[in-house]
Image (cartoon, coloured by chain):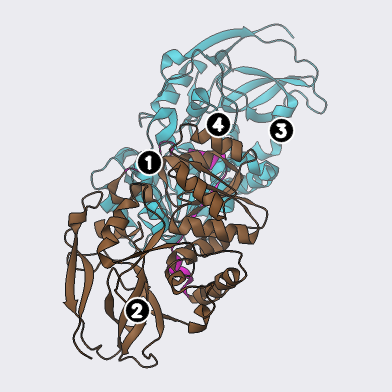
Chain colours: A brown, B cyan
Amino acid sequence: MPSMRSARWTLARPPKGMARLADFRLERFDVHEPRDGELLVNIRYHTVAPGVLAKLSGATYTAQVRPGDVIPGFAVGLVEASAAVGYVAGDIVVGDLGWATHAIVPATKVERLGASMFENSSVPLSAAVGLLGASGLAAFFGLTRVGNVRPGESVLVSSAFGAVGSAVGQFGRAIGCEMIGIAGSQEKCAALVARGGYKRAVAHTDTRFKDELATLLPQGADLYFDNVGGAVSDAAFDRLVLHGRVVLCGQTSSYGGRSAGNSKGMTVAITRRLTLRGFVVHDYADEFGAARQMIATWMREGRIRDDTEVVAGIESAPTLFLRQFEGSAPRAIISPGPD
Amino acid sequence: MPSMRSARWTLARPPKGMARLADFRLERFDVHEPRDGELLVNIRYHTVAPGVLAKLSGATYTAQVRPGDVIPGFAVGLVEASAAVGYVAGDIVVGDLGWATHAIVPATKVERLGASMFENSSVPLSAAVGLLGASGLAAFFGLTRVGNVRPGESVLVSSAFGAVGSAVGQFGRAIGCEMIGIAGSQEKCAALVARGGYKRAVAHTDTRFKDELATLLPQGADLYFDNVGGAVSDAAFDRLVLHGRVVLCGQTSSYGGRSAGNSKGMTVAITRRLTLRGFVVHDYADEFGAARQMIATWMREGRIRDDTEVVAGIESAPTLFLRQFEGSAPRAIISPGPD
C-alpha cells in the first residue's frame, strides 16, 4: 500500500470555557500499513457532537483529550487494509475514529455493521452515525430502557433539534407517544414539526416559553428527555406530572464551564416526586445490534427517516461543531474525505 | 368548657428570601368549644422544621401560608374536648397543628396514635414528632421505599444533624448500613458519631471537605440521602458509585430564594449513571402505622433512641427556627404550653 496524504483535527490546546477555532489544529499525515491487530479505515462520515466539548475541557467518563490527540467523534468507515483476524477490506465499521479522513485503530476499538443493513436505499450509510449511531442509540435506550416509555405517554424533549433530540422525536412517535420538542429558535421548531416526529415544538428563546409549555401540556408530560439542563430544565420539570420521569442524557447548558443555572435545585423534583436517571449509552453495548435492527426496520417501513445533512470536507468540522453552541447549526455530519 | 388564654405564632408578612423574626407574630387567642366534627387539642410538642420556610415564601406541594395564618408545624397533642365521632378527651393525635399551644381542627386533619405505643418509657410522647413523626417517617420511607436501601450498603447523608438526617443515621445503622454523615460544623460531626447512628461524619465547612469525603468513602457511597442540595450535593454526587442512587428529601440550600449553587448541573448524574428520586412522605400515609410500629420496636430494643432536645415555651419557636439556617441550632422541638 503506497503512502498517502490524509488529514485529521487534533487538539491544539484545552479550551478554557467555550472552545474556539484556535483550539483545533488540522494536520496532514501519512497513513502506514496497519500493524498486527489493526485496521486502516477510510472514514466516510463522522459526527461533531457537542458533548465532545466536555472531553476537551476535562475528564468525564472517558479520558480527557490531550493536546496532540485527535478530536473524538463517532464515525463510520470502510476497512481499507486489515491486519486483524476476521476483518477484510470493504467491511463497514463504526466507532470513535475521530475527526479525520483515515484512522489506524486496533480492531477491538470498532464494531462491524452488517452490509445488508444498508442494501436498501432507505437506510443510507450516513445513518450509521445518525439514527443507527451513537445519537440514535442514545435516543433509543434513553427512551426505552432508561425512560421506560409507553405508548400514549406525553414526552417532552429538550434540544429537540439536535442529533439525539431529533431521533428521540422520531422514535417516540414510532412507539406511539405524543412528542413535544423544545428547541433554540422558531425556525428549528417549525422544521421539527414539518419534518415529523414532533407534534408540537416550542422555542425556549420565546419570552412566552413557560406559558406555551403550559398550553401545550395542560395535563403535564409523563417523561422529560433532557439533553440540556439548566434553566430550560427548570421550566420542563415544572411541566411534569406527579411521579413523572426524567431521562438525563446530556447537559449542554453546563458544558464548557458554563453555569447550569438551576436556581431551584431539586426542589421541584421533590414536590413532583420525580425520578431522574442518568445514563451512558455504552452501558447497553451488548444490545446495540438488536437496537439497530429495530431502528433499521422502522426506517424501511417509512416510520422514521434519517434527515441529517451532510457537510463535505474535513475543513468544516470545528466550524460546524462551534455553531452548535450558538444555536445556528443544522443537524449535520461531516463527510471528511474526497472520495 | 371555660374560655382560656392560648397562644399561637402567625405569619406577619411573607419572608423575602431568608425569614426574620419580624415575619412572625405571637397572638394570644381564646379557644372555643369545638364545633361539629372538630377537636380541641392541647399541643404538647411541635416541630420548627426548616422546610416550613418554603411554605412561607411561596406555594409548594401544600398551599402557601398567608399573612394571619398559623405557622405550620407537625405536632402531637392530647384531645381536650371532642365534637367528633369516635374521639374522646385524652386521645393522642398528631398532625400539622402549627406553632401553637392549642388548636381547634377537624378530626379529619389529624391522626390518632395508640396510647400503648408510649407506655414503655423508652418511647416518650415527644418521639411522636421526632423519630415517630414526620421527620422519622421521611427518614424511614426515604431510606426503605425510595432509596431501597439494603444491609451492608454505604449511605451518605447531608444535613445529618437535622431531624430527618439524624433519624436516617439511626435507622440506617439499625438496618445494617455503614452511615456517613455531612453536617455544618465539627461539633455537630463529633456529636453525630458520639451519639450513635453515624460511623463517621464530615463537616462541609471544612476546607478539606472533598478530600475527607474521598478518604471516608474510598469505594464510593451506594446511596446519598439528600436534605440540602447545592454545593454539598455536588460534592456528594462525586462520591457515589456507578449506578448509585440519590434520595431527594429536602433542598434547604435553595429555600428562601437562596441559590442551590449546582454549578455542574446533572452532568455527574449522567457520567455516574445515577438515579435520583424525589418524594413526599405523605404519599406513604397508608403505611404510617406499620412504619411507626417498626420504629417503636427499634426504640424498645435499644437499637435507636430519640435524643431530640425539648425547648420549653412557645416564645422560643421562631428563634429556634431561624437558628437552623445559621447552622447553630440544636436538634430540638418546642413544648409550647405551660402544662
What residue is shown with label 2?
A109
Both marks 3 and 1 on one chain: yes
Q: Is residue B232 magenta?
A: no
Horizontal relation, residue A12 to residue A143: left or right: left
Give, as a three-letter code, the residue at label 4: Thr
- Chain-order first, disc 1 or disc 4: 4
Q: Magenta span covers which residues?
A: A259-285
Q: Residue at x 56, y 69 (%)?
A: A295
Element on which disc 3 rests: strand
Q: Residue at x 21, y 50 (%)?
A: A16
Q: Are marks 3 and 4 in contact (CB under 8 Å)?
A: no
Would you place residue B18 above or below residue B248 in this image? above
Both marks 2 and 1 on one chain: no
Horizontal relation, residue B100 to residue B200: left or right: right
What residue is shown with label 3?
B112
Both marks 2 and 3 on one chain: no
Q: Residue at x 57, y 53 (%)?
A: B144
Would you place residue A321 above or below residue A336 in this image? above
Q: Quadrant of residue A45?
A: bottom left
Dot in front, 2 or 3? 2
Horizontal relation, residue A66 to residue B12: left or right: left
Residue B221 makes an appearance in the image: no
Both marks 1 and 4 on one chain: yes
